[in-house]
Image: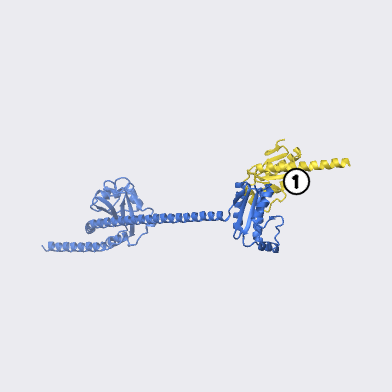
Amino acid sequence: MNFIGIQKLENLLLVSVPRDLIDDEVIRLRRDILKAIRLYKTQIVLLDFSQVDISDSFFGRFIYSTSQMTQLMGAKIILSGLQDAVIETMVELGMTLPEVDAVLDLDDALELSRQLATEQQIEIEDGADDVTKQGKT
Amino acid sequence: MSDGYETKIKQLEAAQKRAETIAEINAALSLIQNDEDILEAIGPFVEQFGVELYSISYAEDIQEDGKPGTLHTVAIRNGAGEKIPLESLPQVRFPLAQFPLNNLAFATPNQPLFVEDGMTDPRTEDGDSRSILTALGINGFVVLPLQTSSIARGLISFNWSQPQTFPQEMRDILTAIQPTLAAIVASRQAQIQMMEKDKADRDKLEKLVEERTAALQDELQRSAQLQQEVIDAQKQALLELSTPIIPIMDRIIIMPIIGTVDTQRARDITRALLRGISDYRAQIVIVDVTGVPLVDTNVADHLNRTIQAARLKGAHTILTGISDAVAETVVDLGIDWSDLETLRDMQTGLVAALRRLGIRMVRSG
């Protein structure tokens, strides 16, 4: 399946949000992201906004709703490259997304995703340990 | 003998009367103010011969040979001496090509043209002169061409609807006043020309004044703009001074806030901070509020927004410099800063930042 602007990279889903999206395209992009998460069983979604230089309330809602939906599907979301003007609009609208990680650029985003992956691995290993322990007892 | 004597006396009386009439007309002509006055001056004399329409026209489009191309009627009266408004005429400009009769008048410009019966006079045989006369309802007419220094100045015409017999007295007097009329019209035209030139000069002067005024206003506007630019530049400089960003270590920046924080200032601070985070790739921002004298709900709200914006940019904010007085007001006002990392001074803030980045400082030796 081919999604425009969405790429799978190891356990990451890399979404580079294009500039000048019209409202319909925003909705389609959100659906594509959710489809891709299910298809690739992705654990971390990386939304890169470095190309987006203006934002309206609809776009702000898009960021907010996408993060909520992604979390509902059990994936972690990382926002990267939000530009100053976009941030100002979002803060004005009160969309501060407290549960979402935001980073400066793709470098930081990859570093954070690796960190998150290690944490998850540790969790799984811990869990496996528990299972073996349980098996032993 | 006695007959001859009486005839002589009559002739003398007639000559005296003629001289008096000419003197009267000349006296009236010497007082003229406008075109109407010229008709006024000769009116009483010609009206006694039952003239039905008389008018004065000026020559326009003077040709190379000094003859007029067009005649422009400037005043017209009826037999009772009443002024006829020019607006009521079908036309006031008559090209000579269309009215060959006027050409006839300028063929002998130094003497009046007397036509007693336009329908039988041999001089009106040319072209369609007679049909024009019929159309205008003119039969007998006199035209006084006015010409000085071989240049046509205009003409005065007198019209009758019926054939006339012009008495010798009238012919003599009209012939006698023709040069005077020509001179008066010529001087009047010169006067009009001069007035027009004066007006043109005045207009030119006014235009010059206007241009200079506009240029001065432009200059004024430009200088005002320049002043505004200087003010803006200073404002910008002041803004940068009031929102300094200090990169203290790799990926850590410090932003001390000094003075009161209002809405505009808060926006400037947010923008400066966001740019600083990009510029220095900061992960930790230490916002120091030691220099903020008063923290109320507004200031707290502004600071919250700034911190949220920084978080969306991927930077964690540590708020330092909370004095005991500020801590007291914040709690008294019910402001919830529990999810913020707040510390008392910058040293502790820096230590917290280093710990967060996993950097440990070791004293050597």
- Say if A136 sits above or below B252 in the image: above
Residue B255 in sight from this viewpoint: yes
B190 or A110, which lies in front?
A110
B30 or B255, which lies in front?
B255
Query: Is the C terminus of chain A in the top left, top right, bottom left or bottom right quadrant?
Result: top right
Judge from the rendering whether residue B34 lies leftward or rightward of residue B292; answer left or right: left
- Say if B303 sits above or below A101 in the image: below
Q: Which residue lies furthest to the front in this view?
A: B365
- The picture's colour for chain B is blue
Q: Which of the chains is yellow?
A: A
Task: Find residue B289 and report its image quarter.
Answer: bottom right
Task: Find residue B266 and report its image quarter.
Answer: bottom right
Tell me the subunit letter for badge 1. Answer: A
What x and y, as percent, mark residue B207? 38, 55
Describe the element under mark 1 as helix, strand or loop.
helix
What x and y, as percent, mark residue B42? 27, 61
Residue A92 in sight from this viewpoint: no
Residue at left offset 15%, top offset 62%: B7
Hey, what amino acid is under mark 1? Answer: Gln
B303 or B152, which lies in front?
B303
What x and y, as percent, mark residue B143? 28, 53
What x and y, as percent, mark residue B335? 70, 60
